[in-house]
Image (cartoon, helix red, strand yellow):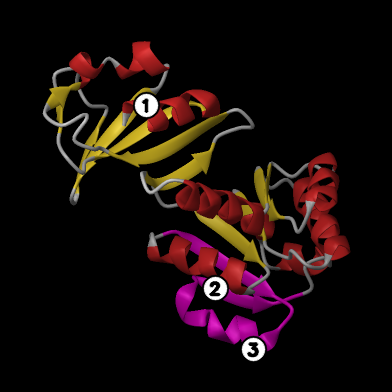
Amino acid sequence: MKKQFIVIGLGRFGSSICKELFKLGHDVLAIDSSPERVEMMRNFSSHAAVANATDEASMRDLGVRNFEHAVVAIGENMQTSVLCTLMLKEIGIPLVWVKAKDLQHQMILEKVGADRVIQPEKEMGIRIAHHMDSEKVVDYIDLSEDYSIVELVASEKLMNQSLLELNIRARYQCTILAIKRGDEVNVAPMPDDEVKLDDVLVAMGHRNDLKRFEAKGI
């Protein structure tokens, strides 16, 4: 379904989000105080505008109150980021996601009403660390402080056995969400679906259980 997004701040992070959302077919209003950055995004957004993100009159003139989702990607200037977030929530934007540069920034953004706070460097650092920790890990996503989703490569230990035979949920308290085989993805696999060598298992569970499954079950 086509959605409407505002992306404020067109640095590397913001422009990347803007391009991808536009590529996915959504309406995207791209905003930055830099004319050069705005010009670079004209072909990758529905509309691009030069504006001060903390000027409520300018934001209202651009029609931001008609958008359902905003991304504030002004990570380095904490004051501008916080003021912009507060203003968007007061205008009535239902969902405001904001980039933070550190924990203090994140805590302030949460207090002024940000619906989700992202620390891209921290999140990417965690994912890369898990890649480096084990050659079995293809990808890693934190769901909360305790729960995660991890993609693991199946070894000969699992080869030609069904999920029922492997009994992963009972043995490791992990849920297999999908099995990826080449370009094919089996979402919500059935108990009698077999695992083949080098399949990628998408597993969800507590971090400790996932680590145990990775060490002993995969």
* Earlier-in-chain disc, 3 versus 2: 3
Measured Cα–Cα span from mark 3 to mark 2: 15 Å
Do the residues bearing badges 2 and 1 touch, measured as CB atoms within 8 Å? no
Q: Which residue is mark 2?
A: 47
| Mark 2 secondary-structure assignment | strand
Residue found at the very far bottom of the displayed protein: 36
What amino acid type is highlighted by mark number 1?
Lys
Q: Secondary structure at mark 1?
A: helix
Closer to the camera, 160 or 5?
Answer: 160
Query: Where's the C terminus, which quadrant?
Result: top left
Visible residue check, residue 54: yes
Q: Identify the secondary structure beneath mark 3.
A: helix
Residue appearing at x 76%, y 47% in the figure: 89
Mark 1 — residue? 216
Q: Is residue 186 above or below residue 96?
A: above
Q: In the rendered view, does 149 fall on the left or right side of 175?
A: right
Q: Name the foreground residue: 119 vs 194.
A: 194
* Horizontal arrangement in the rendering, residue 143 relative to residue 86 (left or right): left
Q: Whole-percent x and y of residue 80?
A: 84, 64
Residue type, numbered disc 2: His
**Residue 9 is a magenta residue:** no
Give, as a single range, the part of the protein colored magenta.
26-51
Q: Is residue 200 left or right of residue 106?
A: left
Quick one: which residue is furthest to the right in this view? 79
Q: Between residue 173 and residue 72, name the one nearer to us.
A: 173
User: Is the residue 205 above or below the residue 93 in the image?
Assistant: above
Residue depicted at x 53% and y 25%: 208
Give the foreground label among 1 and 3. 1
